[in-house]
């Protein structure tokens, strides 16, 4: 079970929200404009027109606007900014809106190279900061050219002040280094321009700065909050005219955390970064240790000194190419270069770049998590407002424990089920004699492994809620409602429902709808494979009778057999993986729906429903906006 989210407290007034928006200013040039892009102004005008209650029919332009998923996503993000500014990172949201106003496949990408500081001392350049600058230099440097001016500027820069490296074609020597970019009003930050043959068309901007260790009491083990902080690092910039330092948020699409030596590795390992996340990568510089010494560590081992030595040898004499290649391969900087260039280059298909999609997906997930946490706090307040304090505390704790145990049970039991011997009986090569057993084995697994304890415990918890309500005299309406999105034919009246039935309804849906479809697919694949083998065998026989030769005929038969079995394996394994994912997702939805159902009951039982109902309605509206944004993102 992942750790509970410890989210930042929502701002309590409009003024504090305005202050936060003022401080969440992007340091990059493209976000310094005060006016929104024309397309977003059109969206605002369109929403104002259709909400005015006029009798005019929608125009063709408005219809095409509504059908464009990119503009639908921008509209949803703007609505999220207006409806729930306290639950979304405004700096990252502005970056996402900026990307959506750019041509698909040619969005500007921002990457942060963050040297991890050891401790919280003054802003001085540490070993990890030097490593971060050198690593970026070697990744961008062209070994076929002599050392350029920007390379020395990059290494000599003091990272007590952040630096922006803008990658693009350089038209004249005047554009090289030494510039200062004005940011917002009165903010300034050094900037250098770099020309890279492979990245000039990527529209790439790189922030190089130092970052404090994130393993602090402010975040704890909250991976989502830490990810949000890494992808919107706060840097201190000088404000004119006094030159005072002010913290400013700088949102990026991707981030590379750079450590140096054993202490750097310890700092990285103490930061609970989400595993399997390509948006945030980690590199630690080691001069002596090999890959076998660091096997299993969740970071990339690099040798910056080796890469620098190889680059110097190659620039000194092209004859050292073999030595350069060996040192470059040993330094492992190729993995960092590949991580940087894989997703940032423009694509001819005119599809949204992967870092932009990851940015929006992360933004929506974090906002949804904060809203759900706020719903939990509202539920706790509603519970304490109607039931006796000691009973409210017990019910609140019982609800949290049930939800945590239910998620753990779903994960553990399904993991055991999908690795069990009975599930392995449905392997693709056993499907020829077990195709008719797919339905029986799948239904048996659902009956035994799909949240049996959670279904029983929710009945006990519902009884405790009923007991507390009877003590307060609330017995005039039923406790719970039936699931609204059910396909079951069972007729259940409201007065008959005594506990949430989402888990049982979900189990029935999986057994009645998905299991028969899975069995039908298994039988279809077996028949198709048998038919393919039969046809190719017949073709091989006819070929042999036409005096082609036994070897050629056997090759045709073997090719048909391999193709048919390979197709059976691919499609069946994909279907099993899809069904496993669907069972897990439906279980998660059932747990969440059950928890929300109890929350609604407790919310109705509150004596002070006015403010709480309005607050929950706003949160649910924000959740609907997030759902609308996610649907538009899937249609991109």
Image (tube, helix red, strand yellow):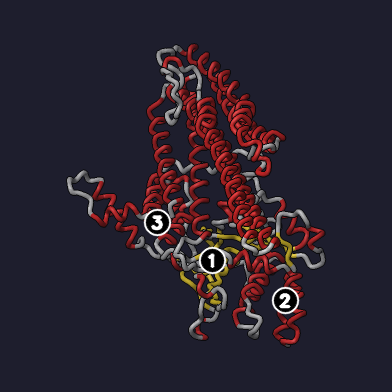
| Relative height, residue 442 to residue 33 (above, below) | above
Q: Given this view, does label 2 or label 3 mark the residue nearer the observer?
A: 3
Q: Quadrant of the C terminus?
A: bottom left
The local secondary structure at tag 3 comes to helix
Q: Position of residue 316 (x, y in %)?
A: 72, 87
Residue under numbered circle 3:
70
Q: Which mark is residue 308?
A: 2
Q: Position of residue 465 (x, y in %)?
A: 52, 18
> Which mark is first along the chain, 1 or 3?
3
Residue under numbered circle 1:
344
Looking at the image, residue 79 sits to the left or right of residue 244; the answer is left
Query: Pointer 1: residues within 10 angstroms few (<14), some, or many (20+)?
Result: many
> Which mark is first along the chain, 3 or 2?
3
The local secondary structure at tag 2 comes to helix
Where residue 281 sits, quadrant-wise, is bottom right
Q: Position of residue 27 (x, y in %)?
A: 49, 64
| Relative height, residue 82 to residue 407 (above, below) | below
Work out how far the residue at label 2 is from the one at label 3, CA to CA, in angstroms. 43 Å
């Amino acid at each position: 079970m992942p750790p509970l989210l410890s989210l930042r407290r929502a701002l309590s007034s409009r003024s504090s929200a305005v202050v936060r928006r003022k401080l969440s200013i992007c340091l990059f040039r493209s976000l310094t404009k005060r006016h929104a892009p024309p397309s977003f102004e059109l969206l605002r005008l369109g929403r104002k027109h259709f909400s005015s209650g006029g009798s005019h029919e929608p125009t063709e332009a408005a219809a095409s606007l509504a059908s464009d998923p990119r503009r639908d996503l921008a509209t949803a993000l703007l609505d999220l900014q207006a409806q729930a500014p306290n639950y979304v990172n405004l700096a990252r949201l502005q970056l996402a809106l900026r990307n959506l106003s750019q041509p698909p496949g040619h969005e500007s990408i921002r990457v942060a190279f963050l040297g991890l500081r050891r401790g919280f001392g003054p802003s001085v350049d540490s070993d990890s900061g030097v490593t971060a600058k050198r690593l970026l230099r070697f990744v961008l440097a062209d070994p076929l050219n002599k050392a350029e001016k920007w390379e020395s500027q990059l290494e000599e820069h003091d990272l007590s002040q952040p630096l922006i490296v803008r990658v693009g074609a350089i038209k004249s020597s005047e554009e090289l280094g030494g510039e200062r970019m004005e940011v917002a009003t009165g903010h300034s930050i050094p900037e250098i321009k770099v020309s890279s043959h492979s990245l000039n068309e990527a529209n790439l901007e790189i922030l190089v700065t130092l970052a404090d260790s994130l393993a602090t009491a402010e975040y704890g083990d909250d991976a989502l909050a830490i990810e949000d902080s890494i992808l919107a690092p706060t840097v201190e910039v000088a404000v004119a005219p006094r030159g005072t330092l002010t913290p400013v948020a700088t949102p990026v699409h991707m981030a590379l955390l750079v450590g140096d030596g054993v202490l750097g590795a310890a700092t990285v390992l103490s930061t609970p970064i989400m595993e399997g996340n390509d948006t945030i990568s980690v590199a630690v510089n080691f001069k002596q240790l090999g890959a076998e010494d660091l096997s299993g560590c969740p970071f990339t081992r690099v040798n910056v000194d080796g890469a620098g030595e190889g680059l110097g040898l190659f620039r000194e004499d092209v004859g050292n190419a073999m030595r350069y290649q060996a040192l470059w391969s040993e330094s492992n900087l190729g993995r960092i270069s590949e991580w940087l260039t894989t997703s940032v280059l423009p694509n001819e298909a005119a599809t949204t770049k992967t870092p932009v999609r990851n940015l929006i997906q992360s933004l929506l997930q974090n906002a949804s998590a904060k809203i759900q946490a706020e719903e939990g706090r509202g539920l706790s307040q509603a519970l304490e407002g109607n039931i006796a304090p000691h009973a409210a505390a017990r019910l609140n704790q019982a609800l949290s424990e049930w939800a945590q145990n239910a998620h753990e049970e779903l994960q553990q039991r399904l993991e055991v089920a999908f690795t069990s011997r009975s599930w392995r009986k449905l392997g693709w090569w056993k499907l020829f004699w077990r195709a008719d057993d797919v339905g029986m084995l799948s239904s048996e697994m659902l009956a035994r492994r799909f949240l049996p304890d959670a279904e029983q415990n929710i009945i006990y918890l519902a009884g405790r809620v009923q007991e507390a309500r009877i003590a307060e005299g609330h017995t005039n309406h039923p406790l719970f409602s039936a699931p609204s999105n059910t396909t079951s034919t069972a007729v259940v009246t409201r007065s008959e429902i005594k506990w949430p039935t989402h888990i049982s309804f979900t189990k029935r849906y999986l057994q009645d709808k998905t299991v028969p479809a899975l069995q039908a697919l298994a039988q279809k694949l077996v028949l198709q494979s048998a038919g393919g083998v039969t046809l190719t065998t017949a073709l091989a026989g006819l070929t042999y009778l036409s005096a082609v030769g036994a070897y050629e005929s056997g090759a045709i038969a073997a090719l048909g057999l391999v193709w048919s079995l390979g197709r059976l394996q691919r499609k069946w394994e994909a279907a099993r993986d899809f069904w496993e994912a669907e069972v897990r997702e439906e279980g998660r939805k059932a747990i969440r729906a059950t928890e929300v159902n109890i929350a609604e009951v407790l919310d109705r039982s509150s004596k002070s429903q006015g403010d709480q109902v309005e607050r929950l309605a706003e949160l649910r509206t924000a959740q609907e906006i997030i759902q609308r944004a996610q649907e538009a993102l899937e249609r991109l």
